[in-house]
Image: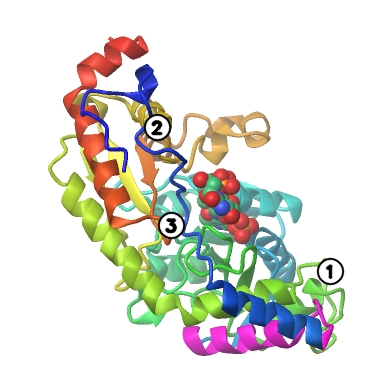
Amino acid sequence: MNAMAADAWAVLGDTPEFDTPVPVGQLYFPDWARYEAAMRGIFARQYYTNQGPLAQELEQRLAGFLGVRHVVCVTNATIGLLMAVKALDLRGKVLVPAFTFPATVQALTWAGVAPAFCDVDLQTQQLDVAAARAQIGPDVSAILGVNLWGGACDIAALHDLARENGLRLFFDSAHAFGCRAGGVPIGNFGELEVFSFHATKILSATEGGCICTNDDLLAARLRNIRSSYGAGTPTPVPLTSNGRMSEAQAAVGLMSLEDFPRILARNRQLHERYQAGLAHVPGLQLVRPSGVDTTNYQYLVTRIDASRFGLTRDQLLAVLKAENINVRRYFHPGMHRALPYVDELPWYRDALPATDLLCHTSLQFPLGALVSDDTVDRICARVAAAHANAARIRAALGGS
Ligand code: T4K
């Protein structure tokens, strides 16, 4: 315990609140004995990868958990998105929000289609359906919705938009494993959905991900793309790849899935603790996941109103990072302002006002297995103290 005096600030030269950085992601680590037993099994079978027994078991268990016909496990969600574009055989442009992680958009580019950037709704932070509608043109072939922050897009409206305009629809659901919309598990919408099982996600395979679909042909295409025709019913595909999930990844994925109810319950507790600790801080708003009836509480997202809080988002970020609190400004910059798109698609630069505002005001706080109640209390206390001491901090940082 290192709780600092309320007016001592590491950014101004005092000792940081935490001795080591408090990480921002979920970071599930299974019990060592379970992990060791799983690795011993892999060694006994002498089988590392290429649709081994653990990868197959994980696919079956995930399909049961999500109530979806096919689960295709992959090495990470980025490669999963890329494979999805090839399996859908997309051409031309794909409607996609610019307020997302680079992988969502860059997978499109790697797969040979162009992004058509759409703004998001300022309140929900999800893809703005009216903005997507306005971008539809003859060269648009699909919509890639992103289900952000343990929430979801307006899925029904996107289904309608896609059907009315003959567009394909698929989802980047990297943030939404275990969520439900209208009682239906995320993973069952559009033609397919892609989840990430990166270490920072609620379901971890250390690295990993999966593609879910209820379409038999699409599943066969995905399996052939994933493993150079190495698995599944042989089906012609435009290109193949290597998206295989290793047995070591699948082993952690299986343990994480088994522990999922406990991880979810803990995330919820942490959310409630932050909510109680930050509710009274002026100018700091906790963003509630929208578009779902069950969330996974995977991220703790806030928005900072500098005029009321007293510091800008970036000033608060600098203050908290100095205290070893690893807050993150997901996503910054918006993809329309990031290379290569800022050069190649310059007309989007000033066309997405809600995205720009969110990129400058959003801040994500530490959550997950490595974060204790005491850590949350100390983080909340530091945030409240930063508000109370904003004038002094601003002056010392060189602001007005
Ligand atoms: N679509 C969306 C909407 C996404 O958000 C993402 C990924 C993807 C697609 C692509 O999914 P994958 O291809 O990754 O499966 C992190 C994650 O790397 C990334 O998976 C995630 N989204 C993104 C939002 O966040 P970084 O660059 O912030 O990660 P990094 O390495 O800085 O780690 C975060 C924190 O966790 C740091 O405090 C360090 C700590 N950490 C991390 C790892 C991996 C640890 O303490 N131990 C660890 O093992 O991107």
* Mark pair 1, 3: CA separation: 43 Å
Q: Is residue 292 left or right of residue 281?
A: right
Residue appearing at x 39%, y 78% in the figure:
261
What secondary structure is found at the residue carrying circle 1? loop
Q: Residue 202, position in %: x, y?
A: 47, 66
> How many neighbours does mark 1 have within 10 angstroms: few (below 14), some (14-19), or many (20 or more)?
few
Where on the picture, by quarter, is residue 148? bottom left
Front label number (1 vs 3): 3
| Residue designated by label 3 | 370
Q: Is residue 46 magenta?
A: yes
How far is mark 1 from mark 2, CA to CA?
40 Å
* Residue at image mark 1: 238
- Which percent across, then down, holds residue 72? 67, 78
Q: Residue at x 70, y 73 (%)?
A: 248
Which amino acid type corresponds to the residue marked 3 in the rendered image? Answer: Leu
- Mark 3 sits near ligand 1, with its Cβ under 8 Å away: yes
Region of the chain picked out in magenta, as a range: 45-66
